[in-house]
Image (cartoon, coloured by chain):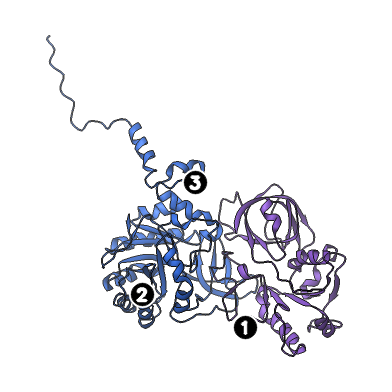
Amino acid sequence: MVELTRGGKSPLLLANPVIAAAGVLGFDGQAYRDLLDISKLGAWVTSPLSWKPRGVVRGARLVPLPSGVLLHTGLPNPGLRRVLQRYAPAWQRSPAPVIAHVIASDPHTVERCAVALDETEGVAALELGLHDRATAEEIAQVVRAALSHTQRPILVRVPLYRAVEAAQAAEQAGAGGVVVAGPPRGTARDPLSGRLVGGRMYGPWLKAQTLRAVGQVVRAVGVPVTACGGVHAPSDARDFLDAGAVAVQVGTVAWVQPRMLEIIARNLGGLELTRANGALADEWEPGLGQTMLRERQRRQPPPPPTTPPPKPPDLPR
Amino acid sequence: MRETQALIERVRRVSADVLQIDLTVEPALMHLEPGQSLFVRPVDQADWQPYLREQWIPVDVTPGRVVVEGAPTRFYAPGDALSVLSPVGRAIPLRPKLLHLLLIAEDALPTPFMHLARKVIGGGVEVTLVLRGEARRYPLELLPPEIEVLHGEADWRWPEQVEMFTWADQVLVLAPSYAYMEVYGPIYATIAQLRQHNVPDDFVSGLFYYPMACGVGVCGACLVPARQRITACTDGPAIDLKQVRFP
């Protein structure tokens, strides 16, 4: 089991370290229902939620980048009340734990969201999405606002370029875990309209920057760290675990290769044996991959003796 | 939605703006309805450039074969294997007792109309296509001969415009994604005025082909400004303009 949060009354434990990031599976987790089995995931994060409804921005929203994409939507959602009316029943039936992503714009709305989500069955934890410019004091305020109104574990998704400072502030305020990191912002020219568009950037190129941030945050805080950014293959996910993350959130690769989400989850869950053939096993068997490791260890020659060999007896001259 | 593989059989550069690609497809793709499209990525693409899948719009669907058409964005060759997510979107809803269909394309290739036009013409529906701006560059030899083609002027007028709006049983409008509001708004306002603000459901629809990322209605890239949550990839491409909130 993977411990995603520490402290509090109910730490979040997952069977698999692979999580679908916010915005990948929508509000009900059904976005790719025909293409991937979310029961194979450790958990999934809902699309971003706010207390009041948020509309979509007008104008260009998607600009292709070299090996990535810039997306600017304004985090549209119908507001928490309507989301709960429509999707809370699906959360209760979800085969994987549901983490509600709350847009942490200010303490007051976070507080109201925390109260509503605390009363909702099927919510395993809350993930607070920080704004890029959130100060340490503002981070502390939103975390405390959430903690004082819910028993659920609290994760805080920190901005990439101020990850250490934000993660420390979140930990000191009582967050159970941190997610490193939210997608960074950028500006690009839309080739269709010719206008400059600002938004959040996604793609495999994020991995190197996120990997560095994860390593720094792991050394700076004592709570579990979940990596998020640039994971597009099982090897990417393993790199983040090697850097000290306890779990990884997988995001936009699902837009391009929806099945990759499940492939990464199966890989990290222990199905290493089937990777060579690119096949998926029919049965889910956590720990199966250890057999290959054990087999390799068995084949290896015994380690050299640590004590010097005994002296041969003196032969008669 | 399901993931299948397709094979490029033939690539035709029809004009400077139009590329047609013949695909050999799995049987599941033979049931594509007019309006539904494919979300495509080369199977052997090792890098992430381009990153997102491309939306390909069928113009003809026959058993085992789908012809798609669009502006050339990259090099494709016969023999290339493709990963295809489909179907993207819903079939374009047709009004009951449809006899006269009016199609309007402004500054956009009328490709999304072609599959629909072929299908309804076979059912005896009269189709008129109005081409404006860049749409006039579309090679007319690609159109079924039964389609009546008109060229509109820059101020949104064409011969017998008013009569046509009243004669048509259904109107579909197409524009580039960056100009949806500027094009669809005036069209809807004109029709609403002619019909004394009593526009029937699905009488005038806009086709929305925003650049999209996920294709399953989650990412928000193709959200249509409306009172309800409408995503072009799952609820479109044809959206009743009565539901759209124009600025």
Tell me where residue A278 appears, x and y as whole percent: 51, 44
| Amino acid residing under circle 2 | Glu
Q: Which image quadrant for residue A49?
A: bottom left
Q: What is the number of the mark on residue A119?
A: 2
Label 1 residue SS: loop
| Amino acid residing under circle 1 | Arg
Q: Which residue sits at x=43%, y=56%? A: A41
| Mark 1 on the same chain as mark 2 | no
Q: Give the crowd class for mark 3: few <14, some 14-19, many >=20 residues within 10 Å.
A: some
- Which residue in the protein does label 3 denote? A280
Q: Which residue sits at x=43%, y=48%? A: A284
Which chain is home to disc 2? Answer: A
Tell me where residue A101 appears, x and y as whole percent: 42, 70
Look at chain B in the picture and name its colour.
purple
Between residue A127 and residue B35, name the one nearer to us.
B35
Q: Which image quadrant for residue B146?
A: bottom right
Label 3 residue SS: loop
Select label 1 or label 2 by which is in front: 2
| Mark 2 on the same chain as mark 3 | yes
